Image (cartoon, rainbow, N blue to C red):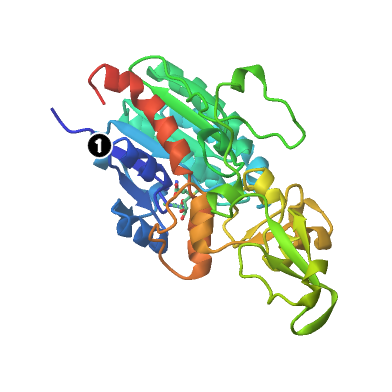
Amino acid sequence: MIPPRIVDLFAGAGGWEEGLRALDYTAVGIELDSLACATARAAGHERLEADIATLDPAGFAPVSGLIGSPPCQAYSIAGKKLGRVDEAEVVACAKELAAGEDNRAERLAACGDERSLLTVEPLRWALVLRPRWIALEQVPAVLGLWELFAELLGPHGYRCDTGILSAERYGVPQVRKRAFLVASLDGEVKLPQPTHRSFHPRRHSVPAAEVDLPEWVSMAEALGWGEEPATLRSNHTSSGRIPGGAPRSLDRPSFTLIGSSYTWRIEKGVREEEVRPRPGWARRRPATTVLGEPRIFGPGSWPRNGHPAHKVRRETVRVTVEQASVLQGFRHDHPWQGPRTARFRQIGNAVCPPVARAVLAEAMRPSVERGRG
Ligand SMILES: C[S@@+](CC[C@H](N)C(=O)[O-])C[C@H]1O[C@@H](n2cnc3c(N)ncnc32)[C@H](O)[C@@H]1O
């Protein structure tokens, strides 16, 4: 029997493949960015550095599984949403590919953003290679396109499921919503059931369907920031009077005890920001979406959403590459390569490995059950 071969399109640094590895599978990843390739290789994943749009998928046959996360800039809120403007071209191109016509060059010429048409590549590869199973991911704005792919793949023998999954529901310490498609030639396929409760900022009771699930993981918990913070506040220390009082976290040695130490106060959970930049919200919820930069914005204070700058500053937490790695569901010592900006970009681009693992297990389940995995 030919061993299963899995191809990961737009493979980046390897978020999907970290999930695959947890299931004891490997893939060949195709990726244009040499630094993302370097990270993937350092982590033990196979990489072909190439432009996917120029490759002939037939050269990769036979393939048992196809994975794909095309670039999302043209569709994401961070970008200019040109993908939406180009949507008619993308939809027409997908329908033509499903009907056996490849008009990508003409459709590309009519697009405002050259990246928009990359979203049809997974469909093109799937139609040529006929993998037993498929798993795709993109920003939520692409869900409609995944639904169209599901319709177009149906007549080619695939059963599909599509939907939005949020990373905190799979134990990732981050609220990150993404649109997924799973498809199989071997039977009915479903997106995975959540393993953790959902996070909603204004909900105080647990929905009945989630009572038996563990709570989501908070950002502070994931980063080892301990329990509710407490601060020692002193107006007067051995070095003299301190206007406004001096804060010191209780997990550090105390100020030197002096005669007036009886005036010192312990403040619970409110002022830790003054000692270390760790705002209280990080203890009360998963991180907001990790965006490929060192800032984790406070809830509802994403600057590009038009919120006042002072609020953004107060609530924003700066994190290290290692901390961003953990928030994205990777190990803290994942071997990210390249300059700091490139490492943050690769992290922000990646599929969260725990979500990848859950989605892939379901995508390949019918094939594995039939011994075709
Ligand atoms: C959303 S990211 C995918 C991240 C990846 N799935 C992961 O989990 O790490 C999209 C990736 O597509 C790559 N890319 C963009 N255009 C490409 C092309 N024409 N051929 C190959 N890769 C490309 C980008 O460099 C980026 O790493």
Point 42% across, 24% down: residue = 183
Quadrant housing residue 148: top right
The x and y percentages for residue 102 are 43, 36
**Residue located farthest toward the right when viewing the structure as drawn:** 243
The x and y percentages for residue 110 are 60, 46
Total numbered circles: 1
Residue underneath mark 1: 5
Q: Measured along the vertical axis of the image, is residue 74 above or below residue 25?
A: below
Q: Nearer the viewer, residue 119 or 186?
A: 186
User: Taking the image as drawn, is residue 243 in sight?
Assistant: yes
Point 57% across, 48% down: residue = 221
Point 51% across, 20% down: residue = 151
User: Taking the image as drawn, is residue 345 in sight?
Assistant: no
Q: Is residue 23 left or right of residue 291?
A: left
**Three-letter code for the amino acid on which mark 1 is drawn:** Arg
Q: Is residue 327 left or right of residue 182?
A: right
Q: Measured along the vertical axis of the image, is residue 288 above or below residue 201?
A: below
Quarter placement of the C terminus: top left
Q: Is residue 225 left or right of residue 104?
A: right
Q: Measured along the vertical axis of the image, is residue 292 above or below residue 129?
A: below
The x and y percentages for residue 346 are 48, 57
